[in-house]
Amino acid sequence: MSRVITLHLCSALFNYLSGCMLPYKMNTSFSYCLSSLLLVSILALGIIIANQSIEALGSTTVTKTNKIPSAQSVYQSQSLSLPKSVSTFVWYIVNEAHEDTHKEPQKLMSNHNPNFIPTKLTIQEGVSILFLDTDAPWDTPHPHTIEITDKSSGKVVYSTGKLDHTDSSKPVILPAGKYVVGDKTYPWMKGTITVLPNHEKNTDNNLTVGAFLAPTNQVADKKDNDGGIHPGWLGYYKTELPKNGFNILSEFNFHYGVCSYCPGKYWPDQKTADHTLIIYSTNQPIDIVLQKLAQMVRDNVYT
């Protein structure tokens, strides 16, 4: 709108100036036209600045409405609330989630979001969710079956079926309400979903958002228990994620070392006590997204 107004003002000023130049050529007073032109110019400049300010305010409002919480916020609050711009959320099942959260916390990646990232999820109605299993299988596989239960009725409304390492579940869209998330085999794995009513569904949305964990620094031992080498760490994913069509929205580094009898105070399967939580987004088709994420999970050094 401001561009249209500006064009009309410029046209009017040009015509006005042309009108003033004619009497000038006819030896008519030019000072009156010049002073009038100055006043009109000041008025035009004020209108342009006001319109730009309005546009900037509108842009800021949209940005705030569509803002995705930072990795630091997700880590510290153990929660994530997604804006209407998101169409799909990939829920991350954390490595070592099969370890008892209450009895053996020293084996976990962290005491923040120890099983799912996030632990508490809030989405708009119409957003699809699915689960990505990153719980590494070396020594003993730890498949997961995640169930979503309607909090009001107590009925299971969704099950992932058996998920092995790097597997992802089929997407599901839940009606507005409150839900409890749990693992059929490991009862300490708990999460919640709040689905907010949304009467302004945007079918054009194709934004997928998710979380990912990686060692903050390169680790000395990149091998799994079968001798396979895994290159994954923060520096690796900062290259591979963008190269594969993912936007890194934010990162947060954290330290978790509470194993009193372990070298370095961290559980050996984690390879380090220093990790980085990454929040990413992408506009790629979800089947392509999941194929690429499966490879990135395989590349990680966690065992």
Image: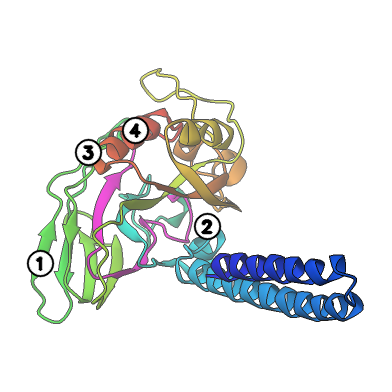
Disc 3 versus disc 4: distance between alpha carbons?
16 Å
> Dot 1, crowdedness within 10 Å: few (<14), some or many (≥20)?
some
Amino acid under label 4? Lys
Residue at label 1?
Answer: 156
Asked whether disc 2 touches disc 4, contact meaning CB atoms under 8 Å apart, the reply is no
Left or right, 32 with reference to 56: right
* Amino acid at circle 2: Ala
Q: Where is residue 93 in the image (x, y as percent from the top left)?
A: 33, 50
Q: Where is residue 278 in the image (x, y as percent from the top left)?
A: 50, 48
Q: Name the residue under label 4.
A: 292
Question: Does residue 144 lie above or below 156 as drawn?
Answer: above
Q: What are the residue bounds of the magenta stretch?
A: 108-136
Q: How far apart are marks 2 and 4 (CA)?
A: 21 Å
Query: Is 54 displayed left or right of 281 in the figure?
Result: right
Report if residue 112 lies within the magenta region. yes
Mark 2 / mark 4, whichever is N-terminal: 2
> Would you name the residue on which mark 2 appears?
71
